[in-house]
Image (cartoon, grey):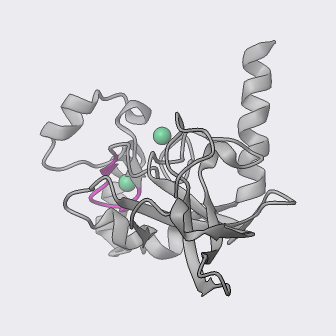
Amino acid sequence: MRPSDTGKPPYVARIERIESDSRNNVKVRARWYYRPEESLGGRRQFHGAKELFLSDHYDLQSAHTIEGKCVVHTFKNYTKLENVGAEDYYCRFEYKATTGSFTPDRVAVYSKCEMPYNPDDLMVQCDSCKDWYHPACVGMTIEEAKMLEHFVCFECSEDDLKRSQNGFHASPVDDAKVVAVFDLFLMIKANWFLLII
Ligand SMILES: [Zn+2]
Ligand SMILES: [Zn+2]
């Protein structure tokens, strides 16, 4: 939908109802999607360029403000897209505009930096533990990571012998680390504070 400031990217909303008054003015009830930078916590490293939050903020808008149609995918479906077009977005959180809180309030984190998955950033998967790592977090460049056919993380290469002896195989789902979204924002703010001092 057309933004109030034409220099900004379009607003994205889910149209939940279409109605017209006696003078045939068509209005739509829009449930807004927020971009990360419009949320109270702001845009963070783990937010993708096409990430949106489904908010609890509704408005009645003139149908004339509609500029076009886009697709807001689930996070899982978005990560499976072969090509991401201009009209493709994804949503993994619902957002309460008044409190700045997210649902779900917990999210899986990966890599040594323990951050949620940003689909814009390349990660490599360990063949053994199935955890995902940013190349920089395991001392590789992105170019080196792209050339890899197999990758085993440092912890797994150390554990390899033990693992083969007792046949133990960790389940990646059971092992996925999960953190509270709220803590994630606090954590990042704390890091910023350290950088400032
Ligand atoms: Zn990392
Ligand atoms: Zn591993």
**Boundaries of the magenta span:** 123-131
Which residue is outermost to the right?
99
**Residue 173 in the image, given as x and y percentages of width and height:** 47, 74
Q: Residue at x 64, y 81 (%)?
A: 23
Residue 20 makes an appearance in the image: yes
Residue 35, above or below 196:
below
**Going by the picture, which residue comes out furthest to the front?**
23
Compared to residue 183, the image places residue 188 above or below, namely: above
Which residue is located at x 28 percent, y 27 percent?
Answer: 141
- Depth check, front residue: 47 or 190: 47
Lateral position of residue 183 relative to residue 150, left or right = right
Q: Quadrant of the C terminus?
A: top right
Quarter of the image holding residue 131?
bottom left
Residue 26: quadrant of the picture = bottom right
Give 34 or 14, whichever is nearer the viewer.
Answer: 14
Q: Position of residue 116 (x, y in %)?
A: 54, 53
Q: Can the viewer see residue 170 in this picture?
A: no
The percent coordinates of residue 87 (x first, y second) are 34, 59
Tally of marks? 0
